Amino acid sequence: MKNILHYPRLDSILMVEKSIITRKDYPTRMQLWNSIPKKMQYQTFKLILDYLEKSNKIMFEEDKIIWIFPNNKKLNELIQGAVSV
């Protein structure tokens, strides 16, 4: 069992979510961690990313982070333009 030293607070989770949503290019984990306004321990940051992935808000593709929650404008545009099967 992992030994978790710091659990994230809600404001930290929201801060990471906002950083992912507002970026035009999807950063790597390290780029995102370095760009968040308040610094946090990397273990806490990884725990937030695990939570966001398990709650189907983000996904990882080739080390990039992609916001997939339904309020993603780009994703909604792709879905609207997709061909029905």
Image: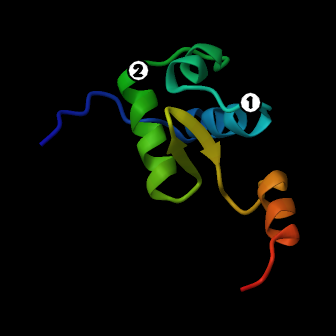
**Closer to the camera: disc 1 or disc 2?**
1
What is the CA distance from the residue labelled 1 to the residue labelled 2? 21 Å
Residue 41 x/y as whole percent: 41, 18
Q: Which residue lies furthest to the left in this view?
A: 1
**Picture disc at residue 4:** none
For mark 2, give the secondary structure.
helix
Instruction: Give the image quarter of residue 4.
Output: top left
Image quadrant in which the N terminus is located: top left
Left or right: residue 64 compared with residue 53: right
Mark 1 or 2 closer to N-term? 1
Residue 81 x/y as whole percent: 87, 68
Q: How crowded is mark 1: few (under 14 residues within 10 Å), some or many (20 or more)?
A: few
Report the front residue among 21 and 48. Answer: 21
Residue corresponding to mark 1: 25
Q: How crowded is mark 2: few (under 14 residues within 10 Å), some or many (20 or more)?
A: few
For mark 1, give the secondary structure.
loop
Instruction: Give the image quarter of residue 39.
Output: top right
Left or right: residue 2 compared with residue 75: left
The residue at the point 53 percent across, 49 percent down is 59
Image quadrant in which the C terminus is located: bottom right
Name the residue type under label 2.
Tyr
Relative vertical location of residue 68 with respect to residue 27 in this rendering, above or below? below
Left or right: residue 50 compared with residue 2: right
Residue 49 x/y as whole percent: 47, 39
Report the front residue among 11 and 27. Answer: 27
Residue 83 x/y as whole percent: 81, 77
**Colour scheme:** rainbow
Relative vertical location of residue 20 with respect to residue 54 in this rendering, above or below? above
Residue corresponding to mark 2: 42
The residue at the point 65 percent across, 55 percent down is 68
Name the residue type under label 1.
Asp
The residue at the point 82 percent across, 52 percent down is 74
